[in-house]
């Protein structure tokens, strides 16, 4: 690049975007890379505080910021992602469908450890919508050394892409509602409507609901019955505390399912239970799921619908960020809950 005084720039081609910022009102591109500077542009550039511009002089060892950011985005993006064209040296990545964002944090940190490289993403395991910005790439200078960019590209390709979006699978869901007070009709069930509301965005198909008393044998029997009928997820509601009459965990264990965790370092939701009967997840849902707007259920549910098998270490890791602030106006997932 060659540095040229703005007052002598008429007729020359700008080699980088120039941003205009009006505090509190506007931030955007005032001049585009490749734009030919006219005499009328010179006062505007001076008003923007630009006394010099850069004119591109080709050099094989340097890669322009736009090309570099575009290359980073292409190498980082896996299935389910597309990228925008460069704007002010930045390239955004967006999902092509709703799903679960997966970020290889170790790879991301390795890339960002390189000098002059910047790649920012949303959190791993966040539910994302088609078209929203989930990551952005750029380089710090107007041009970056080729060998640095090639090293970043190599890291992106080491163990698969840094970023992917997993689509949600429309699972068949069986609901086993426990509680002698509900079974007898003394209390009306409030769980099933909440479950339908929370699972509907992932395409859930409710196979049915059965209500059973606090009897571990009957709980176990109904879980098996739902699996036999084709349930791909079984949700067991109520009876998850340590009270003597709360026997839902006993009933889930009695199925022979592999228990991943009973109890979780998440508030609300510490009495949550996760088990697998073969490949079918069985979740024991504590009462907070019915009363709190956001619980551990909201953290685990999208992973199940994305086809992932959640492990105990992953449940344990939820403790960092596992405290819900219970804001007066819930902003989840645009908050710290569930973000390590």
Image (spheres, rainbow, N blue to C red):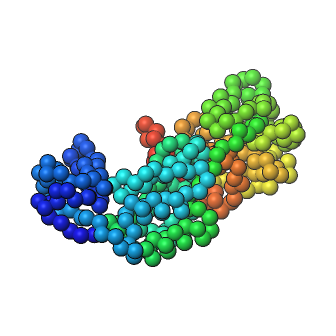
Quarter of the rendering containing residue 49: bottom left
Q: Residue at x 66, y 43 (%)?
A: 168
Residue sticking out furthest to the front: 11
Q: Residue at x 76, y 51 (%)?
A: 275
Residue 152 position, x and y percent, is 49, 70
Quarter of the rendering containing residue 112: bottom left
Quarter of the rendering containing residue 11: bottom left
Q: Compared to 328, does 112 lie above or below?
A: below
Q: Residue at x 73, y 33 (%)?
A: 205
Residue 107 position, x and y percent, is 54, 68
Q: Compared to 166, does 184 lie above or below?
A: above
Position of residue 78 in the picture relative to residue 282 (left or right):
left
Position of residue 119 in the picture relative to residue 29 (left or right):
right
Q: Residue at x 72, y 45 (%)?
A: 283
Residue 28 position, x and y percent, is 29, 47
Q: Compared to 233, does 86 lie above or below?
A: below
Position of residue 272 in the picture relative to residue 113 (left or right):
right
């Amino acid at each position: 690049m060659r540095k040229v005084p703005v007052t002598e720039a008429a007729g020359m081609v700008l080699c980088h975007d120039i941003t205009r910022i009006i505090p509190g009102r506007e931030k955007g591109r005032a001049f585009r890379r490749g734009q030919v500077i006219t005499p009328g542009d010179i006062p505007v550039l001076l008003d923007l505080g630009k006394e010099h511009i850069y004119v591109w002089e080709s050099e094989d060892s340097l890669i322009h910021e736009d090309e570099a950011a575009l290359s980073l985005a292409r190498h980082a993006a896996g299935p389910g992602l597309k990228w925008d064209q460069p704007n002010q040296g930045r390239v955004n990545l967006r999902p092509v469908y709703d799903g679960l964002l997966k970020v290889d944090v170790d790879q991301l940190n390795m890339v960002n450890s390189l000098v002059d490289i910047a790649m920012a993403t949303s959190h791993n395991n966040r539910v994302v919508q088609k078209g929203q910005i989930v990551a952005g790439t750029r380089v710090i200078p107007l041009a970056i050394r080729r060998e640095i960019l090639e090293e970043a590209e190599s890291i992106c390709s080491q163990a698969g892409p840094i970023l992917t979006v997993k689509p949600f699978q429309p699972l068949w869901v069986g609901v086993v509602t426990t509680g002698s007070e509900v079974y007898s009709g003394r209390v009306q069930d409030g769980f099933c409507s909440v479950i339908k509301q929370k699972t509907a965005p992932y395409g859930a198909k409710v196979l049915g609901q059965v209500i059973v008393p606090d009897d571990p044998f009957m709980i176990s029997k109904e879980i098996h019955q739902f699996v036999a009928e084709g349930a791909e997820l079984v949700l067991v509601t109520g009876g998850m505390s340590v009270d003597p009459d709360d026997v839902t965990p006993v009933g889930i264990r009695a199925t022979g399912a592999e228990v991943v965790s009973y109890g979780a370092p998440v508030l609300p939701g510490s009495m949550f239970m996760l088990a697998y009967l073969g490949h079918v997840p069985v979740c024991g849902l504590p009462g907070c799921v019915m009363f709190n707007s956001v619980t551990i259920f909201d953290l685990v549910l999208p992973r199940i619908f994305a086809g992932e098998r959640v492990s105990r270490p992953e449940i344990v890791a939820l403790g960092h960020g596992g405290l819900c602030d219970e804001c007066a106006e819930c902003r989840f997932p645009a908050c710290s809950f569930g973000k390590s």
